[in-house]
Image (spheres, helix red, strand yellow):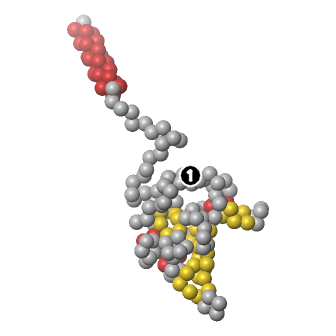
Amino acid sequence: MVTYFKEIATAAINTFKGLGVTLRYLFKPAVTVQYPAEKLVPFERFRGALLFDAETCIACNLCVKACPSSCIALENATNEAKKKIAKVAWYSIDFGKCNFCRLCEEACPTKPKAVWHSLDYELVFENRDEMVRLWKKNFDFVGMFFDRKSKEYKKPAGQIPIQTVAARR
């Protein structure tokens, strides 16, 4: 009989302990982020979407050589005499192959980096064409994709940048 009342007392004490924890957190401020309205800013070393700056790139091909997935391609620009110059004509990254290893960013010798990981974590791809991003002179940091149906370059729809100017390391 004593064991029975001991178990009832232990259960009541544990119940009140649980209610105490609940009451303690009831009056603390909420830590929930209202996602579509508010967005968390990732840590500085987060590897988000790859961005590219065609003005900074010197077309050294070090990022292409460093990429283990072979998802980066570029072509040097040429002058009137058809000689290669230290600028890029076009640069493309296939996000379907990319494993976000950051080796391309580490291999880039320019200051600031010509290719870098942004803090954007909301990449949206509606089809395979949108996974291959292309950059040319005067393209945005986000890049464009070639739509095979309409035979033209389009800006990706649905990608919401976290920052207006992407942070470079």
Residue drawn at (43%, 57%) of the image: 46
Instruction: Tell which of 166 and 151 is nearer to you.
Output: 166
| Left or right, 16 with reference to 158 | left
Amino acid at pointer 1: Ile
| Left or right, 78 with reference to 24 | right
Please tell me in which quadrant of the rendered image residue 28 appears: top left
User: Which element carries disc 1, helix, strand or loop?
Assistant: loop
Percent coordinates x, y for residue 123 in the rendering: 57, 54
* Residue at far bottom of view: 81
Query: Is residue 97 visible in the rendered structure shown here?
Result: no
Check disc 1 and report the residue beneath it: 160
Structural crowding at the residue carrying mark 1, measured as other residues with C-alpha within 10 Å and reported as few (<14), some (14–19) or many (≥20): few
| Left or right, 150 with reference to 124 | right
User: Vertically, is 36 above or below 138?
Assistant: above
Percent coordinates x, y for residue 30 in the rendering: 39, 33
User: Vertically, is 130 above or below 76?
Assistant: above
| Left or right, 2 with reference to 22 | left
Quadrant of image for the C terminus: bottom left
Please tell me in which quadrant of the rendered image residue 16 appears: top left
Quadrant of image for the N terminus: top left
Percent coordinates x, y for residue 18 in the rendering: 32, 23
Residue drawn at (39%, 36%) of the image: 31
